[in-house]
Amino acid sequence: MSHSTHLAYTERDMTPHIEIIRKNGTSRLYKAGTSLFYQGEFPRHGVLLTKGAVRAYTIASSGEERTIGFYTAGDLLPIAWLLDQVGISLFHYVALSEVRALRFSKEDFDRTILGDPVALKSLFTNLSRDYSAAMLRINGLGQSRADEKIAFTLYYLAFRYGTLLPDGRHEIKLRLPHVVIASMVGLSRESTTKALRSLQRKGIISYSRGVYTVNKSSLEHYVGEDIYQSLELA
C-alpha cells in the first residue's frame, strides 16, 4: 500500500505556533518591491507572513541575483535567526506582491513558541515539510540538462506552492517571470524560455502572465521519477 505525503500549506493557519503569533504580533503592510530584510543585517524582529509572497535572494559575484526561494502565508522570517543558528539575515527578502505580515520580538518567540512544547512541535512539523520541498529543489539543481532542471524546479514549486484545481492539475500560486525561474537554476533567460515552451508543447505545463499550471502525472513521467507518485501536491 502506498502512503501519501500531503503538503498543502493552507492548513498552516490552523497550527498552534501561528495562532500564538497572531495573538501577539503587530500588523504590518509591505508594498511590492519593499525589502523586509537585507542580507547581512541584524534583525530586530521576526515576521509571520499572512498574505502575499516574498522572494529570498543573494547577489552573485557577477552582480546577478540568485533566487534562493519563496515564502508565503504561514511562513516565518528569518527562520535561521529565530532559531539562533545565525545572528544576521542570511539573504535579501523582498516582497513579490503586496505583503501583509505580523511582526514579533525574538524574546516573545523564545518564550511563547520555543518554550511551548505544542507550539514547538507544530513549528517543526512545518519545517520538516519545507525540508522535503528543499530536497526536490536540490535534485533539480543537480540535473545536467536545462529542460530537466526546469522540469524538476517546476515540480518543487508545485509541491511547495501548488493548489489543486477542479480538473486535477496544480496551479503554482506565485507569479514568476521567466527571468526569476532562470535565476533559480543558473540558466539564461533564453534557455529557460526555450525549456518552458518545450514543456508546454508536450502538455506538461501551461502558463500565462507568470502563473504556471502543472499536470502532475505528465511531469512525473517526463522526469522519470515514479517514486514521486506517492506525493500529493495539494
Image (cartoon, grey):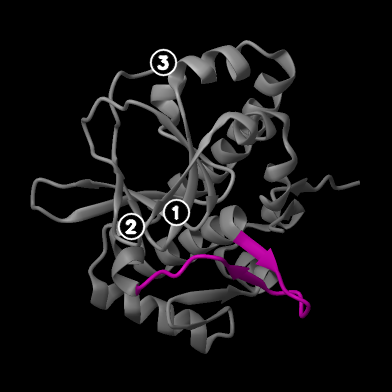
Q: Residues within 10 Å of mark 2 (few under 14, many from 20)?
A: many
Does the image show residue 142? no
What label does residue 84 carry, if any? 3
The residue drawn where x is 49% and y is 52% is: 100
Query: In this picture, which residue range is highlighted in magenta?
Result: 162-177
Q: Amino acid at mark 2?
A: Val
What label does residue 47 carry, if any? none
Give the spatial CA distance, label 2 vs label 1: 8 Å
Give the spatial CA distance, label 3 vs label 2: 29 Å
The earlier-in-sequence mark between 3 and 1 is 3
Q: Is residue 190 magenta?
A: no
The residue where tag 2 is placed is 185
The earlier-in-sequence mark between 2 and 1 is 1
Q: Amino acid at mark 3?
A: Asp
Vertical side of 201 occupied by 103: above or below: above
Q: Position of residue 169 (x, y in %)?
A: 69, 74
